[in-house]
Image (cartoon, helix red, strand yellow):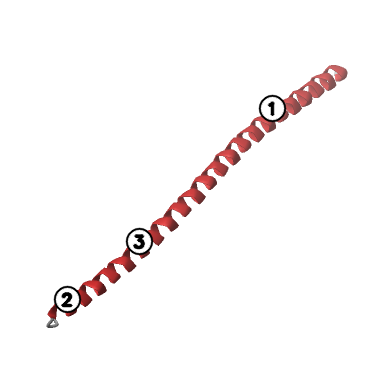
Amino acid sequence: MNDDLKLMVNTLIEEMGRMEDRINTRMDERFNKVDKHLGNIDVRLESMQHEINACKLERDSVGLLLKKIDQLESRIEELEKRPA
């Protein structure tokens, strides 16, 4: 009976080891998928940040152009007021 008990315990321990290996493999696969997904998100965020910076630069440029247009319109009005 003692040998049968040892055999059963060893079999259970071996099966537990195999289960642990399968679980670890699945978890590694899952972590790799998550890492890949997060990497893709990082790439997209970086691209979006470039787009945001470009939009800010365009906004600043448009603001400067509008200011220059106002200045030029003022100069034109002043010139039009002068007698010929």
Spatial CA distance of label 3 from label 2 is 27 Å
Q: How far apart are marks 1 and 2 (CA)?
A: 82 Å
Which class describes the residues within 10 Å of circle 3: few (<14), some (14-19), or many (20+)? few
Secondary structure, mark 1, is helix
- Residue type at mark 2? Glu
Q: Would you place residue 74 above or below residue 52 in this image?
A: below
Q: Relative to residue 62, is residue 83 depicted above or below?
A: below
Occupied quadrant, residue 7: top right
Q: Which mark is residue 59?
A: 3
Which residue is identified by label 2?
A: 77
Q: Position of residue 76 (x, y in %)?
A: 20, 74
Q: Residue at x 59, y 35 (%)?
A: 33
Tell me the element at label 3.
helix
User: Which mark is nearer the camera, 3 or 2?
Assistant: 2
Residue 37 horizontal side relative to residue 16, left or right:
left
Q: Residue 79's x, y, as percent?
A: 18, 78
In this view, the mark in front (1 or 2): 2
Q: Is label 3 or label 1 in front?
A: 3
Q: How many labels does the image show?
A: 3
The residue wearing badge 1 is 22
- Taking the image as shown, residue 84 lies to the left or right of residue 15, namely left
